[in-house]
Image (cartoon, rainbow, N blue to C red):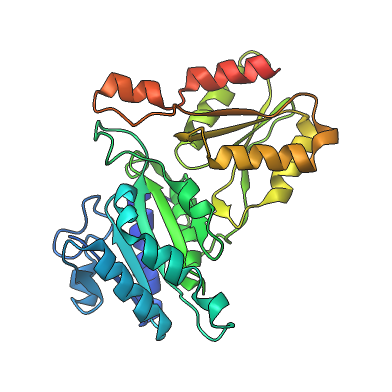
Amino acid sequence: MAEIMYRDALRQAIFEEMEKDPTVFIMGEGIAGRGGSYKVTEGLLKEFGSGRVVDTPLSEATFTGAAVGAALVGMRPIVEILFVDFTALVMDQLINQAAKYEFMSGGQGKVPMVLRTQGGAGNGLAGQHSQSLEALYYHIPGLKLVMPSTPYDAKGLLKAAIRDDDPVIFLEHKLLYMTTGEVPEEEYIVRLGQAEIKRAGEDITVVTYSYMTLKCLEAAEALAQEGISVEVVDLRTLTPLDKSTILDSVEKTGKAIVVNEAVKRGGVGGDIAAMIMEEAYDDLDAPVMRIAGKNTTIPYNLELEKACTPTVKEIVEGILELL
């Protein structure tokens, strides 16, 4: 095992898959010569050349559409879009084309592409660069949606996403790139659709994903000092959703909180909470609670930004209230 940063784990995954499969290539703004704004693609141009590491014009709709076309004829493109906020420019390409092509062609065509982007609040980047928009893609049949929280998961899930025959939205959080964790030196894959219990517990289940996993683990550690045992379920993949791991945990603990950074209204957390209520009602000792971002645009001011997303203190208080 090597201790590496999240961004380096992503780079390793891309490098290994490009080395293994000549149909894999990557395209995006500033990813070649500059190595990307978050340095995920640093060094790939030197290794694979400008034919497979492609700097694009500032036109997300154009190069995402090109990737869909390339996938249709047998390539495996990776598209990098700098902020998830900018994916609003590629809704037709993703939702009406990539997500539906296999279904509408009767299975005659597939779109094996990965769209990598990052979202979430942090760093005072204001309302157009700080959104959590996973619910948009979670809603669309035909798209897979991945949101890893650790370097280990980031590498294993990205390799799985690149090999997958369906279009995959791979959402990274801007505050995770510099976090570190152990990653095996030998090749491995993390299967899409498999959640992981990041911390076992007996008293309450906390279901979460992406950067909120770190905050939930911090809250669980704080509560352990008071004798409260919190089980933290990291979804890792939102679509497909690993219902069985969630429901098995709720059956054991009898209580559940869903934590996500995105605004509460119309969010992934509400759908998961409803699923638990529908499918595990007899196992519950209390209603399912949601802890989520405030229903507001993320402000530029750093202190106001912090007030808009769940804190460790809020998660602790929510757990204590439910217990």
Asked if residue 38 can be seen in this view, the reply is yes
Residue visible at 40% across and 78% down in the picture: 71
Residue visible at 42% across and 82% down in the picture: 72
Is 7 on the left or on the right of 29, as rendered? right
Is 255 on the left or on the right of 129, as rendered? right
* Residue closest to the far right: 282
Asked if residue 1 can be seen in this view, the reply is no
Is 273 on the left or on the right of 41, as rendered? right
- In the displayed structure, 178 sits above or below 24; it is above
Q: Where is residue 307 in the image (x, y as percent from the top left)?
A: 38, 20
Which corner quadrant holds the C terminus?
Answer: top right
- In the displayed structure, 243 sits above or below 253; it is below
Q: Where is residue 288 in the image (x, y as percent from the top left)?
A: 69, 29
- In the displayed structure, 316 sits above or below 149; it is above
Residue visible at 49% across and 76% down in the picture: 101
- In the displayed structure, 69 sits above or below 158; it is below
Q: Where is residue 196 in the image (x, y as percent from the top left)?
A: 62, 47
Using the image as rendered, state which of residue 11 and residue 135 is in the foreground: 135
